[in-house]
């Protein structure tokens, strides 16, 4: 790959998905890129590792994306990993109702006309098509308002579908969440039809889908990638960043050098005192169980009325996600293994004791998607001409998701192009 001539290297700091997206975009266009990451591995909150207890590779947490996530699709194409997002090839969401002990499946029709809401076999049991009209207000923007000020947060449709959908996308109790962020999900996926709602899961792991192919691409383009390298200070002079002080030394920034700061908000605030950024967060708890599901097991089942929210079946393990899980993070891991296995067993009709399990608690999984926190999200451009921000907490208009992180990386890359 030939590098573009001209001054300027882009330092990307933070190799989570936002930093990887910025680095991949810039390197793919021939720019000189140096990517530094504090941890020993890339991926940030979207990572995989070998777990000693289960003796297998697990993800820190199950990540679901949808076919309508345009930045995800662009990124996967750019890194040549489209085939590592797999799913049923249609909009299909099985749910297990704990109270009724019954499995049912939501099947939105593919096109933009939502005729599926007229078909009782495709919609949520116990709902009528009029219930779905309650979502119409979310097609418009409602800056500063809570979801419960814009739509009714009760009834069967709410309890069995909308609440589980919003809590997992917003990682926040939906009743107190931002109507604008909830609306973004509806506008970008549900309202565009089932074609935009095919569920997609990283296969065989988050790292294999989102991270390793990006690092390989950066390597092919001659980018410098340095893991285990933490940024301690940004030296600024007037309207320019002039130096980056890493734990292994300082890099002076020359004319034309740019910085994309793609670190979590609490780190960005330390590096750039005075920066407005979200400062309230919610946890996500995941449980991974070493037990191979039968080949016919549904890949992903939403749980209504349990502790688990989603139960995933991978070829070698069951895995459970609970969002907005602040009520669970301080509970003992063994207790959580039993509690969450109970839901897996109910959903998949299993009996016997829980197999070996690993609980992964991400205490600051995402910022709280409330109107007050949304108002603290800064834009990508800063008051320093050569310094740009990326991350799922930047003002993307989306909740803290892979789509938001990747989009923020694209925006920072566009602004940072030398
Ligand atoms: C358990 C869990 C489940 C989730 N599920 C979903 C899901 O189903 N669907 C979905 O779309 N999203 C999901 N998300 C959200 C998604 O993971 C995030 O939105 C995305 O990974 C954020 O990427 P990021 O690059 O913005 O931030 P991060 O991943 O936090 O990246 C920031 C990087 O900066 C590095 N860093 C920090 N300080 C420094 C420093 N001083 N110098 C250098 N580097 C530094 C960090 O080590 C990190 O690698 C989930 C998140 C979690 C935690």
Image (tube, rainbow, N blue to C red):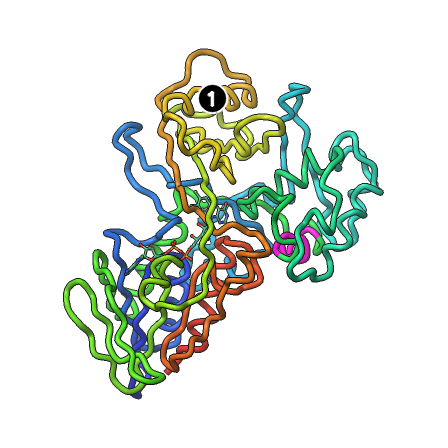
Q: Residue 327 appears at what percent x and percent y?
A: 48, 33
Where, by quadrant of the figure, is residue 128 drawn?
top right
The residue shown at (37%, 25%) is 332
Q: Is residue 61 magenta?
A: no
The residue shown at (55%, 19%) is 346
Pick whichever, 312 or 160, lies toward us.
Answer: 160
The residue shown at (29%, 78%) is 236
Pick whichever, 306 or 313, lies toward us.
Answer: 306
The quadrant of the picture occupied by the N terminus is bottom left
The residue shown at (42%, 65%) is 390
Pick whichever, 91 or 155, lies toward us.
Answer: 155
Q: Residue 71 appears at what percent x and percent y?
A: 52, 62
- The extreme front residue here reads 274
Disc 1 residue crowd, few under 14, some 14–19, many 20+, Cα 10 Å? some
Is residue 24 rendered to the left or right of residue 90? left
The secondary structure making up most of the magenta span is helix
Pick whichever, 405 or 114, lies toward us.
Answer: 405
Q: Find disc 1 in the rendering and name its residue.
A: 339
Q: How many marks?
A: 1
- The extreme top residue here reads 352
Image height check: is 269 above or below 102? below
Mark 1 and ligand 1: say if the CB distance to the nearest ligand atom is below 8 Å.
no
For numbered disc 1, what is the local secondary structure?
A: helix
Q: Give the range drawn in magenta.
A: 181-190
The quadrant of the picture occupied by the C terminus is bottom left
Image height check: is 151 above or below 251? above
Is residue 264 rendered to the left or right of residue 234? right
Where, by quadrant of the figure, is residue 6 drawn?
bottom left
- The extreme left residue here reads 248
Q: Residue 105 appears at what percent x and percent y?
A: 67, 33
């Amino acid at each position: 790959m030939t590098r573009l001539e001209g001054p300027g290297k882009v330092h990307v700091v933070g190799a989570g998905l936002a930093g990887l997206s910025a680095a991949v975009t810039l390197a793919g266009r021939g720019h000189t890129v140096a990517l530094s990451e504090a941890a020993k591995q890339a991926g940030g909150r979207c990572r995989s590792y070998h777990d000693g207890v289960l003796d297998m590779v697990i993800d820190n947490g199950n990540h679901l994306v949808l076919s309508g996530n345009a930045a995800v699709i662009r990124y996967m194409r750019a890194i040549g990993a489209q085939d590592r997002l797999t799913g049923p090839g249609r909009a299909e969401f099985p749910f297990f109702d704990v109270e009724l002990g019954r499995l049912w499946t939501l099947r939105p029709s593919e096109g933009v006309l939502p005729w599926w809401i007229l078909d009782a076999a495709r919609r949520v049991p116990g709902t009528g098509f009029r219930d779905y009209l309650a979502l119409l207000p979310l097609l418009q923007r409602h800056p500063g308002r809570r979801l419960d000020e814009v739509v009714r947060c009760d009834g069967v449709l709410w309890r069995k579908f909308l609440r589980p959908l919003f809590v997992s996308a917003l990682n926040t109790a939906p009743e107190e969440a931002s109507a604008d962020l909830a609306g973004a999900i509806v506008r970008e996926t549900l309202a565009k039809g089932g074609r935009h709602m095919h569920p997609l899961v990283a296969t065989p792991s988050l790292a294999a889908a989102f991270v390793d192919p990006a690092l390989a691409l950066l390597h092919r383009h001659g980018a410098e990638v340095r893991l285990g390298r933490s940024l301690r200070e940004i030296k600024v002079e007037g309207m320019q960043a002039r130096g980056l002080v890493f734990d292994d030394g300082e890099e002076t920034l020359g004319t034309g050098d740019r910085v994309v700061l793609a670190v979590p908000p609490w780190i960005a605030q330390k590096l750039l005192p005075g920066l407005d950024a979200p400062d309230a967060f919610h946890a996500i708890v995941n449980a991974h169980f070493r037990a191979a599901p039968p080949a016919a097991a549904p890949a992903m089942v939403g749980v209504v009325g349990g502790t688990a929210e989603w139960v995933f079946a991978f070829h070698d393990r069951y895995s459970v996600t609970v969002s907005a899980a602040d009520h669970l993070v301080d509970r003992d891991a063994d207790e959580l293994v039993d509690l969450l296995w109970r839901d897996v067993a109910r959903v998949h009709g299993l009996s016997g004791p829980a197999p070996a399990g690993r609980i992964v608690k991400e205490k600051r999984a995402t910022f709280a998607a409330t109107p007050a926190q949304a108002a603290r999200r800064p834009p990508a451009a800063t008051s320093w001409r050569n310094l740009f921000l990326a991350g799922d907490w930047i003002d993307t208009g989306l909740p803290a998701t892979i789509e938001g992180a990747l989009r923020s990386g694209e925006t920072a890359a566009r602004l940072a192009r030398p």
